[in-house]
Amino acid sequence: MKNKKQIFEDFYKENKQSIFLFTLAKTNSREDALDITAETFLSAWVNLDNFRGQSTYKTWLFAICRHKINDYYRKSYKDNSIFDHSFEIENYNVEEIEDNSDSALINKFSLKDLFSKLKEIEKELLLLKYMNNLNFAECASVLNMSETNARVMHHRVINKLQTFIN
Amino acid sequence: MENLNQFMNNNKLDKNEETRLDKIVLQKIKPEKSPGLGIFYKFALTLFVIFVVGIGVFFLPEEQQRKVVKPVSAMEVIQKTQQTLKEMLAKPGILHYSYNIKTVTDFEEYDNFDVEGYVSNQDEKYLIRYDVSKSDTLLPTEMVPGKSYRDFSPQKFATFSDGINEYSYSYGSTSNWRNLSEEMISIEHRSQLKSLVGFYDYLLQGESSQYKLKEDKINNREVFVITFTYPGIALTREANGATKRVETIYEAVITIDKETYLPISNESSSTFSSLQDSQIETYNEFEIISIDEANNIFEFSQYIDQLVPINKNTSPSSSIINLGNGKFELRNPGEDIITPIFSTENKEYILDGNFLFDKITRKPTIIGKFLLGKELEVSGFTQKTEVAEVLWIQDINYFRLKSLNPTIPVQPTDTNVMPTPTHRLTIPTENSYSGIVYDSEYGGSRREAIIVEGTLPEGLQNENNSNIERASIKIESEDMVFSINEWYENGFSYSNWIPEEIDTEYLGNILMHEYAAKFIYYFTDSRNYKKSDCKDFLGNPIQSPCVDTSYKFETAEGPRFLTISCEVKTTPEKATKTCKEIINNLSIAK
């Protein structure tokens, strides 16, 4: 039977890339993302015994990560947006839009352009859903909202992106 | 430029980074004790305890043996829990505790406070940290298909003392400190836990027959569950948005860990009809920790580094006085700036926040919830400020509290039909007419949204309404201008509270801004009216409400003011009539 340390190590190995990419997308700094990723896992380790099983380990980890990113912005007073908000609609590929999936739609935009159109929480929702394959219930758990709200928000974001394409 | 997929493929941790990360994370993970050994110890200990207890019971007199197996009463459980908590507070070291408070009312789907606190048991140091999140509150959007939501970003607050000064920290806002007297620091020290101890004190004043006790298993924990009912006061919202206080029956559920006799949760919920009013405190941790562990959990430097000393007010030291009997009440219930009051026969004191009222959550503590509207005897410090006499409660005498379980349901009584004012409020009325303009200001430093609704007389034109920035309504005709403008005192800290630009070029559309002010506007197809496109902000068609002349102006939550005015221009008689009609048809609710 695996002990706590072994379980955590497996958990760490499985999720370190996802947490790093999520953080990198939010901070746009590899160094900061590396630090925050480390802090996230260390916090998770310290608090592992307190994990109450109300969410999955993965959503719990993302929730911790989110707090760590907020701490990062608070400490450094950085503007919580990684790219300038220039309007660059020309980056999408019109032909590809015929692939009707939401994921395809999102990938029509450059990340910079995508983020310039979205609110912080909307960005997080997309990153969790499309970068980390969390389902709506899991996204909702990380973002501290109801599943319905996550679905509504997602619907709005997709509609919003669709209007840019149209 | 990278899209999301490309970003994911191109930006993974490289070998070097991965090694660095592994080094940081994996090397800091402390090796666990051998699980086999742990199990062996646990097993041996369990056998030993069973043996000792068994032998002990065997040799007890018959009467004592019965006592050992006799089920405990609710009173005993409460008493023992209180005792355990007091013992935790007496142990040397740092007591770390964490809990969650969730409130659900008719006003908000929920308010959620994750609280982590520590108290040093050797001196008067303490820290309480709150992570606050709110529900995406449902708005009364009966005119819009589906529902719309507000977005609340999480906020962080902390208050802590190094034993000499008390500091407060609020994320994105200001940080300050105040120099308190020794006695005041002493009152603040452990105030949350004192409140909890006081809560058990309060319960112990009841009759044991009022409490029902059952044993249960929740999340694999053996627990005691104590239930009872009590009369309390709740706040609800009428269909028109006005607030109403009602007396109602609450049901309380107290859950205590059977093994440790530490609190697990305290829940209080209204049982009256469809009224929503509940408060749940869930305690997650009570542990004695080292200073290194405390630093790890609380990251003190992040608060201390950002402190900006302002308003150094040394509070005069004073002795404890007995204020006698009075009632704990709330001023402006339903507003964000709820003021807790202790009112005696002759005088009214504002509570500083300890014991009955939590100054950071701005809500009554669980015991405050029980004691709201009830007569109490308190003692404490009073401190005069420029605007009020502030009371720091040091002790409460629960002797007068007896009735916890009325059998006759209390009928709701309407005591408040208008939104209670904050520090500045003038609803425009006919009387506010100065001969040129109906002018008023409404608002204050609360955080609730303000909603202004009304109807417009026929014939108003909608020119000059384009490209208005920030939240405003401007209806201009040849002879009058009606406007609502939103403004802020001393600027803003929270970026998501700053209204985004509102483009009213297309009046008739429903213009809606999720983070910021919501501006919903309808026009009919009559003469002088611009035809409504009847589309929502996403361009989806809206049905019936589009043939309405009503307007609705809704701010985002946050401290703010509205200036509402109707100015008469060229044809006084007609314009006055129009303005009067608008003003009389206007209502403000939140």
Image (tube, rainbow, N blue to C red):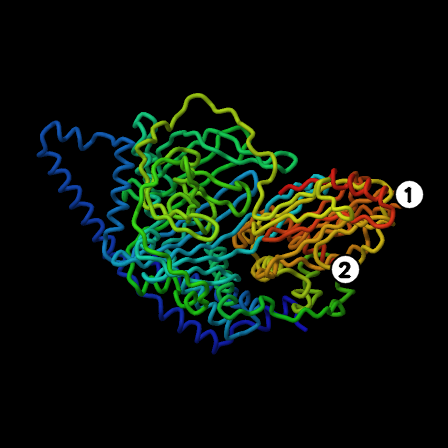
What residue is rendered at 69% in x and 56% in y? A158
Viewer-side label of 1, 2? 1
Crowd band around label 2 with a 10 angstrom C-alpha radius: few (<14), some (14–19), many (20+): few
Query: Label 1, on which residue?
Result: B527
Q: Which quarter of the picture shows residue B301?
A: bottom left
The correct choice, above or below, for B402 with respect to B92 in the image is: above
Q: Nearer the viewer, residue B14 or A79?
A: A79
Crowd band around label 1 with a 10 angstrom C-alpha radius: few (<14), some (14–19), many (20+): few
Give the residue at the far front of this rendering: B435
Q: Could you tell me if the residues under marks 1 and 2 are in contact, i.e. CB atoms within 8 Å?
A: no
Answer yes or no: is residue A32 visible.
yes
Q: Residue B352: x and y, percent?
A: 41, 49
What's the distance in space between the residues labelled 1 and 2, CA to CA?
Answer: 44 Å
Is A13 displayed left or right of B440 in the figure?
A: left
Q: Quadrant of the C terminus of chain B?
A: top right
Answer yes or no: is residue B370 visible.
no
Q: Residue B293: x and y, percent?
A: 32, 62
Q: Are marks 1 and 2 on the same chain?
A: no
Amino acid type of the residue tagged 2 in the rendering: Glu
Q: Nearer the viewer, residue A10 or B352?
A: B352
Q: Quadrant of the N terminus of chain B?
A: bottom right
The correct choice, above or below, for B283 with respect to B303 in the image is: above
Give the residue at the far right of this rendering: B527
Q: Residue B102: x and y, percent?
A: 47, 45
The correct choice, above or below, for A65 with respect to B360 in the image is: below
Amino acid type of the residue tagged 1 in the rendering: Arg
Query: Label 2, on which residue?
Result: A98
Is B210 displayed left or right of B529 in the figure?
A: left
Secondary element under disc 2, as helix, strand or loop, is helix
What residue is rendered at 54% in x and 49% in y? B134
Is B451 displayed left or right of B576 in the figure?
A: left
Q: Residue B180: x and y, percent?
A: 36, 58
